[in-house]
Amino acid sequence: MQDISDVFLNDTQIPDVFITDYMPALSHISIKVYLMASLHMSHDRKVSSKPVRQALGLEVEDFKAAICELAGQNIVATESDFSAFVLLDLKRQALDRFYRRLTAVPMKESVDRNAQHKERSSLISSINDTYFHGLMGPAWYQAIDSWFDRYQFEPSVVYQMFVDAAQRNVLNGPNYLNKVAEDYSKHGIRSFMELSKYKDENKKVRLIAQQIGKKLNKKITEYDIDLIEKWVVVYAYDFSTIELALRHAVRLSDPNLNYFDKILSGWHEAGIRTTEEARNVEENNARQKQGQRRSAAAKRSDSRDNHQQRDYDDSYLNQFYRFALLDEKDTAGEAKEES
């Protein structure tokens, strides 16, 4: 039987990598389950579910949900009936992801690489001190390295990513910035100058998107943003030009931006670049349609005026007179018979 003093004198070790890389993104119930499981873990890292669940006072379904979340993050491996689970070795996983034998790289190549990435190392150290108080987890190191290697970002671009993420309070894991990095790469951003230009354009796109949504009384979706970005960035149209196309919305019960995209794309293909040119095209189209309506109305009027009255000769009219006389005789005969 375990001595009661063990409860007060023993320590339960929690890997730093759990705190830095996993805990910020986990729900509070999952964190409690992991901590309690660490206390109940046997020498082979196996944990019985029942004592953990009872110690925390969790319902069965809440406990299962927490185990599923931990398993999804590759923190535990559970049996199919949830009766027991194993705490995976997070430190070993981190080493397997990040450790690389020094002998795998020749000395000269290693020295050249370190010199080449001296600025990168200085940046990572600055990010670690500024945003993680010197406790940045291994997942962040891997993410930063991948951004440099895959997207060829300048260090200033990566640092600005952390500035923006900190302002939005989304530094609880690399997932958000992974998406940002992918978006930057899609827009051809590598240097800080390119990033500044993109942010200015993006600000303009968002502003015009708000104006369009207000004009159409419509909620703007991310798909709509992609179309608006094309109009603003690729076609270089300002809101006054786009607004001319939006006037066609009076014909639509449920305005769809694809309809306006066809109009604006047509203008762009026709070489229309300014609001004045677009207005001239709209006015010219209106005059042409009005002329077509007048021409169609004139043709209908001429058709009525040119309608010729048919001429009937006496023989044609006399046959109706004879039919009338016969009807009168028949009527008179019927009257005599009744009397």
Image (spheres, rainbow, N blue to C red):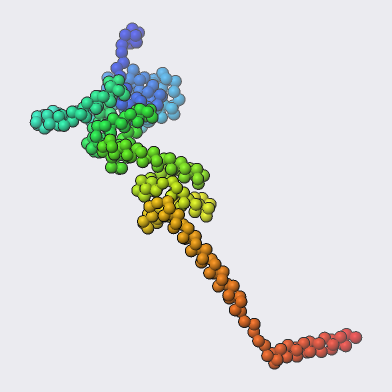
Left or right of 292? Residue 163 is left
Which quadrant would residue 59 be assigned to in this image? top left
Question: Horizontal and vertical percent for residue 296?
Answer: 54, 69
Q: Name the one closer to the observer, 269 or 79.
A: 269
Left or right of 307? Residue 263 is left
- Quarter of the image with the N terminus is top left
Task: Tell me if residue 261 can be seen.
Answer: no
Which quadrant would residue 334 be assigned to in this image? bottom right
Question: Horizontal and vertical percent for residue 136?
Answer: 28, 24
Q: Residue furthest bottom?
A: 315
Q: Name the one closer to the observer, 153 or 295.
A: 295
Q: Is residue 57 above or below residue 321?
A: above
- Quarter of the image with the C terminus is bottom right
Q: Residue furthest top?
A: 5
Q: Residue at x 37, y 58 (%)?
A: 270
Q: Residue at x 46, y 41 (%)?
A: 210
Question: Horizontal and vertical percent for residue 328?
Answer: 81, 87
Which quadrant would residue 317 be assigned to in this image? bottom right
Q: Residue at x 34, y 33 (%)?
A: 176
Q: Is residue 227 above or below residue 59?
A: below
Left or right of 318? Residue 206 is left
Q: Residue at x 31, y 35 (%)?
A: 178
Q: Is residue 176 above or below residue 130?
A: below
